[in-house]
Image (cartoon, rainbow, N blue to C red):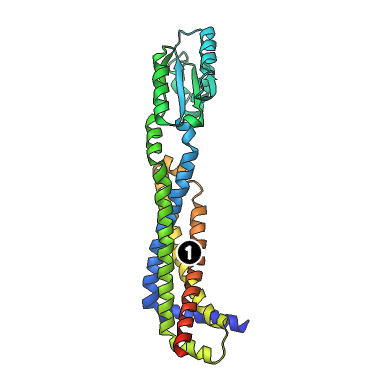
């Protein structure tokens, strides 16, 4: 136990002795971790946005007041035969009033007197037809049918999502890979510089018969500590920034719900990557020194 405590003390004593080397490394880890957290959040946001894609392919068709119940039944029967339709929901005037009151003040309807809200159909398109051109085509068909006062769907959002769907995944994943690679190089170089500055100490430990674990442990813990501190500070900053953005932009906030998971993944992945890069750097150094001495 005393040896472990000594190794832990030795690993953190290097932070003070080599602060001129480690501080720039810590700042770089902080910046890379912030970008990594942002990339993971963007990837999660893109995934959540895709789950919302079905709402963009939902058509609201508002019926004319002059249409009878028999005509409504006939329209519903004809719509159900369409292959592009996944499900059809009829919303009566009374149901429309309840929905309105759930989102807005009831006083707005009381000022009008009679119920001004029309009955409508909510048409959910089949996932196979989630293409903006199909949505636009069927909006036109429903509008020209003469049965509806208005037909609407978030066509602009559907087009935007279709255009950016590939980019929503490609760029965050590419950024994550490049950042992890960059972090491994940065941490490995920092540990390597620390090793060279303590070369005499390492050689003395070897000559006195110290085990590989006894030599490697302080440097691995040092690198892991750098990764943990840098990524933790970056994650706290990322949570603060994205929480602020979510408060100002509700749609962005809903897409970034559950943002704690990506930042936890950032801290864990950077910490373990730092430990691995440090271990690799130490073993390369020891192998090189062994080759030189022989």
**In the displayed structure, would residue 5 be above or below residue 234?**
below
Question: Compared to 195, does 269 lie above or below?
Answer: above
Q: Callout 1: helix, strand or loop?
A: helix
* Front one among 293 and 55: 293
**Looking at the image, which residue is at 50% across and 70% down?**
276
Residue 20 visible, this orientation: yes
x and y percentages locating residue 208 in the rendered image: 55, 92
Left or right: residue 154 versus residue 217 is left
The percent position of residue 201, horizontal first and vertical second, equals 47, 88
Q: Which residue is mark 1?
A: 270
Disc 1 residue crowd, few under 14, some 14–19, many 20+, Cα 10 Å: many
Quadrant of the image containing the N terminus: bottom right
* Of the pair 32 and 230, the residue shown nearer to us: 32
Identify the residue shown where x is 51% and y is 57%. Answer: 265
Residue 24 found in image quarter: bottom left
State whether residue 232 is above or below residue 215.
Answer: above
Q: Is residue 224 left or right of residue 144?
A: right
Compared to 150, does 68 lie above or below? above
Q: Return the x and y of residue 267 as percentages of the image width and height.
A: 49, 61
Report if residue 104 is visible in the image: no
For the point 40% across and 62% down, the residue is 32
> Going 44% across and 76% down the picture, which residue do you hit?
191
């Amino acid at each position: 136990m005393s040896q472990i405590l000594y190794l832990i003390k030795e690993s953190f004593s290097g932070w003070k002795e080599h602060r001129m080397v480690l501080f720039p490394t810590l700042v770089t880890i902080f910046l890379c971790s912030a970008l990594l957290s942002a990339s993971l959040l963007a990837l999660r946001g893109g995934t959540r946005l895709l789950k919302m894609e079905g709402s963009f392919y939902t058509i609201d068709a508002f019926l004319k007041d002059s249409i009878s119940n028999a005509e409504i039944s006939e329209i519903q029967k004809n719509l159900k035969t369409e292959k592009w339709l996944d499900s059809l929901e009829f919303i009566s005037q009374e149901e429309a009033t309840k929905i309105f009151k759930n989102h807005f003040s009831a006083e707005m309807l009381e000022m009008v007197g009679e119920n001004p809200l029309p009955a409508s159909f909510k048409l959910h398109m089949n996932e196979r037809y989630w293409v903006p051109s199909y949505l636009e085509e069927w909006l036109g068909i429903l509008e020209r049918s003469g049965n509806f006062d208005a037909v609407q769907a978030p066509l602009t959002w559907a087009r935007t999502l279709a255009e950016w769907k590939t980019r929503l995944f490609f760029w965050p994943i590419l950024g994550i890979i490049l950042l992890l690679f960059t972090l491994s190089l940065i941490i490995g170089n920092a540990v390597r510089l620390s090793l060279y500055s303590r070369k005499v100490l390492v050689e003395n430990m070897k000559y006195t018969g110290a085990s590989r674990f006894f030599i490697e442990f302080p440097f691995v813990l040092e690198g892991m500590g750098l990764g943990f501190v840098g990524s933790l500070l970056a994650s706290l900053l990322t949570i603060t920034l994205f929480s602020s953005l979510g408060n100002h932009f509700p749609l962005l906030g809903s897409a970034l719900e559950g943002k704690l998971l990506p930042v936890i993944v950032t801290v864990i992945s950077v910490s373990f990557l730092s430990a691995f890069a440090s271990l690799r750097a130490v073993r390369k150094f020891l192998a090189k020194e062994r080759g030189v001495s022989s």
